[in-house]
Image (tube, rainbow, N blue to C red):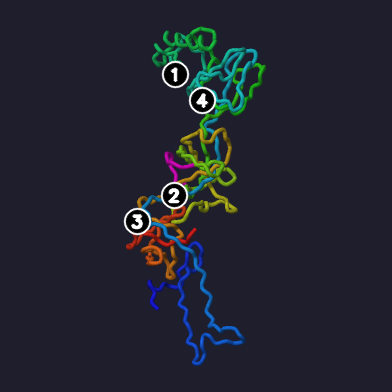
Amino acid sequence: MTADRAPRPAALRNPRSGQRRPRAAAVAVPILAAGVTAGALLGGYALRPSRPAAAPQTPTGAAPVVRTNLTNTVQVSGSLSYAGADTVVNQAPGTAYTALPAAGAIIRRGQRVYEVDGAPVTLFYGARPQWRALSEGVVPGPDVAQLDRNLIALGYGAYLTVSDYFTGATAYAVELWQQATGLPVTGTVPLGQVVFEPGPLRVVNVAASLGATPQPGATVLTATSPVPVVVAQLPVNQEYLVRAGDHVTVTLPDGVTTTPGTVTAVSSVAMASGGTPSDGASPGQPGSGSSGGSGSSGGSGGSGGSQDTVAMTVRLTHPAAVGNLDQAPVSVNVVSAQAHGVLAVPVSALVALAGGGYAVDVVHGSGALATRQLVPVQTGLFSDTLVQVSGAQLAAGLEVEVPSP
């Protein structure tokens, strides 16, 4: 009997199942002794020669060899938070706080932060806190230019040019703003009438109480930016994978939804597993390129198997994707390896060779006339269900044998 393909080593295995691949077995038919026929009867029953049970067959199908891009990632645990942290301090004299914001409120430029004796204290943007009353004749300074920028942004600076000088145009713009917001129209900005903060505020906690007497320098509230960020703890031996400006994806708390983000900062201080700075912790060195899948590798140092980490901050491209979640657990997916324009096959198509290495069964034809050719391959990057392969007899469009689903 002739076979339609060359015999293969007996030790070929499927790398996923670890089972031997089924092979057709030749069944030797014994020659019956002379005078004994296949139809001989004993006790009314036919005697038949025994045959070994057929080996179980694994259903197979075919999948194409494709040319594609492959990406491998590692996952890092993190949590949702909000950028920045600030304390709003009162500078307005008065008898009582008459309005205060609620925790979670978002306050933007030109809106009331709180109220003293019925007069609003308004949010203006700027890095320099107000430290003096501003009016015509004050010594020029950057706080005046900061006021100008806000008046222009709010639409009251048609005749105003940003400068360090409090001019008549500045006074006129102040009057327009005061008239529009119900403040006494004076053309001057007394100390405490505005609060300068770097940007919008998200109120975290309100320290003041309604009816309490405002005290200069007393904390009114604490706040953050309304911009959600992710803070993740990156093992120091994977620090080399990430730089500020790198693009990552974040898996949200439902474990399914992902959203893009950008790394904005990677701390230079390593922390031990307990959250304390780790003396002598140093970033790990990249190892030899691994063809494995996702996951975190062991850390550098730390007793009891603990792992030193550095904080990585990620700003989300679409902040609305997280809604109002805060301190919720997420995962940051960091690209660890990429391969562009390579040949790839399903991982399940690989056949382990007895002498080491892998091969694939290339299928030629279809149906009952299909033949299979065992082709050795070199593997590269593993990514999800695909693996990079190369070989002299491989080309995109060929089909390889895979287990049927």
| Residue 248 is a magenta residue | yes
Classify the position of the N terminus by image quarter: bottom left
Sequence-first tag of 1 and 4: 1
Residue in the foreground of this view, choosing between 11 and 96: 11
Sequence-first tag of 4 and 2: 4
Identify the residue position indicated by label 3 in the image: 396
Q: Which residues are magenta?
A: 239-249
Sequence-first tag of 3 and 4: 4
Which element type, helix, strand or loop, lies under badge 2?
A: strand
Residue 132: x %, y % from top left: 51, 15
Q: Amino acid at mark 4?
A: Pro
- Which residue is at 54% across, 23% downward? 107
Identify the residue position indicated by label 1 in the image: 153
- Spatial CA span between label 1 and label 2: 44 Å
Crowd around label 4: few <14 · some 14–19 · many ≥20 (10 Å):
some
Residue 284: x %, y % from top left: 47, 50
Which element type, helix, strand or loop, lies under badge 1?
A: helix
Viewer-side label of 2, 3:
3
Sequence-first tag of 3 and 1: 1
Identify the residue position indicated by label 4 in the image: 200
Identify the residue position indicated by label 2 in the image: 336
Crowd around label 1: few <14 · some 14–19 · many ≥20 (10 Å):
some
